[in-house]
Amino acid sequence: MSDSSAVEDRPKSKRVAALRGLVPFLWPYRGLGLLALLALILTASVSLVLPLAVRRVIDGFNDADAGLLDKYFAAALGIAGLLALGTGLRYYLVTRLGERVVADIRRALFDRVLGMSPAFFERILTGEVLSRITTDTTLILSVIGSSVSVALRNVLILLGGLVLLFLTSAKLTGLVLLIVPAIIVPIVVLGRRLRALSRENQDWIAASSGSASEALTSVQTVQAFTHEGATRAQFAEVTEKSFVSAKARIRTRAVMTVIVIFLTFAGIVGVLWVGARDVRAGEMSVGALIQFVIYAVMVAGAVGALSEIWGELQRAAGATERLVELLNTEDSVKDPVRPVPLPRPVRGEIAFEEVTFRYPARPEASALNGVSLHVSPGETVALVGPSGAGKTTILQLLMRFYDPQSGRITLDGIALPDMARSDFRQAIALVPQDPVIFATSARENIRFGRLDATDAEVEAAAKAAAAHDFLTALPQGYDSYLGERGVMLSGGQKQRVAIARAILRDAPILLLDEATSALDAESERLVQAAVERLAEGRTTLVVAHRLATVKRADRIVVFDKGRIVAQGTHDALVAEGGLYARLARLQFTEGAV
């Protein structure tokens, strides 16, 4: 599915109530939130008291007692100081709360996604997941750390201001309230439109991030096929749609702001006109009118701020929906509620019983079709056959990256779904077809196999994998930074680092997926010898296209079109004829040439 269709097919945002999804993250810090609320109430209350002090000062000019006037000024200054202190305290508490909650959300998202099976990543781009972890949480940070507290403060000022307006002049307040319905209507109507546009804008931003991530992680392939122009055009298209969506959101919000602010201040001007006439008629003092004006401006400002914050809350509601959706995503592969522990020591007996499996992305094609395979403890079994025959699928199912649609897979007699994945995976060392090199030092890349390994053990594993010589030749030796995805290394060097990692893991089950495919003849000989030593006493499954690397396997299992078509030793299969004999004849004849 293209990025465009993926965005268009997503459901739109529902309502601001979606922000309730943040409650589980806010609840542990309710004490801090309460302190922030108290500071907020303090600042709002002081703000409402300030116009009273102003009235006293203005009306005090007509008072003959100069000492009383000084006290009014001193009280006004004290109120201003209290307001400043409360505002600073509110900012500190609210911002700290926002940073803490967003850090927890990011960690929860990462923890959730990191444990998802590969089937999850067949449905969503990695770049989009990263966009949710970064862009969406940043938006929520602005809401928790700013918008919510500002909104609550303005609500308090709005309500308190209306009460004090009424106490100052019931007549003028009645006129102000006539304007309220005209202000609320555009907020409600345009707010619904703004909510939908906010969710759409966030979706396009995520799609843009996903498109960029996919292109940049495959930049060499893009450049090799001179695909830069098409890739730029694709990214530009998604980015432009994101801009168009953002422009529509901004336009809607701008229109709403214009309407609300104009109606609010137009109403205030009319009310002030009436108030000025009352002052001239002697029905109210100048100080009372100014007090009323200040409260009216505060109420109008609160309404205007709330109209803007409403848009921010709409965007945050959309972001929260997306994050909660990610946190609540059901994985197709789950650990049992009460897992059965894998007995130690692990013997390494593996059994596939009538296993049929189809990849979620290709449900119409069976990768495995009724496969039964038994591997005895300590046996080395090679899986061979044409590309797409199902060999690598065996390893992926054994690691329980996926669950089969039918059949059963057991390890030491226990079905994999009955155990915790982290439990039985500790007994497995994997060398994948595409070795993964992390953006850290060579030493830490090898130590990834066993985090508590000493430097001496790391170097011993590297020597066994024929990686010691080229690693010591690097500028900082084992401490050399290997770059993103190991760009400092050749394909063969990456494979040897991955093999060293598996050797260091020292697991009872060894899975090798084309582990020597990128090695030169000399390195292959050295690594093959190391693998044979490593395989001694371990259950080993080897996936290979190059049959020369599996001739010494205890048993060779031949796959074709998702089925086992033959199995036996190299010599027996060659003598038997069939697919293996044909593959052997082609490879060894080519080798002779």
Image (cartoon, rainbow, N blue to C red):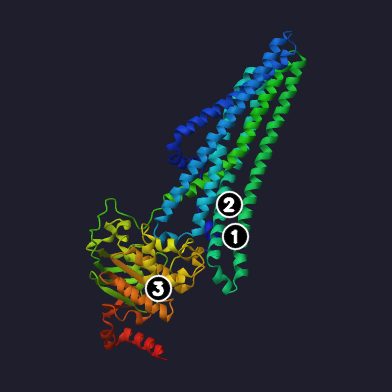
Please report whichever mark, 1 or 2, sits nearer to the chain's N-terminal start. 2
**Rendered location of residue 150, percent (x, y):** 58, 34
| Res 233 visible | yes
Whole-angstrom CA distance, mark 1 to mark 3, is 46 Å
Residue 301 lies, in percent from the top left, at 65, 32
Q: Which mark is residue 238?
A: 1
Q: Amino acid at mark 2?
A: Asn
Instruction: Name the side, left or right, on which 86 lies relative to 539.
Output: right
- Residue 466 is tagged as 3
Q: Residues within 10 Å of mark 1 (few under 14, many from 20)?
A: many
Q: Which of the 4 image quadrants contains residue 451? A: bottom left
Residue bearing the label numbered 2:
201
In the figure, residue 561 lies in which quadrant?
Answer: bottom left
For image coordinates 35% across by 67% down, the residue present is 503
Residue 567 at x, y = what percent?
27, 79
Task: Give the label on residue 98, or none.
Answer: none
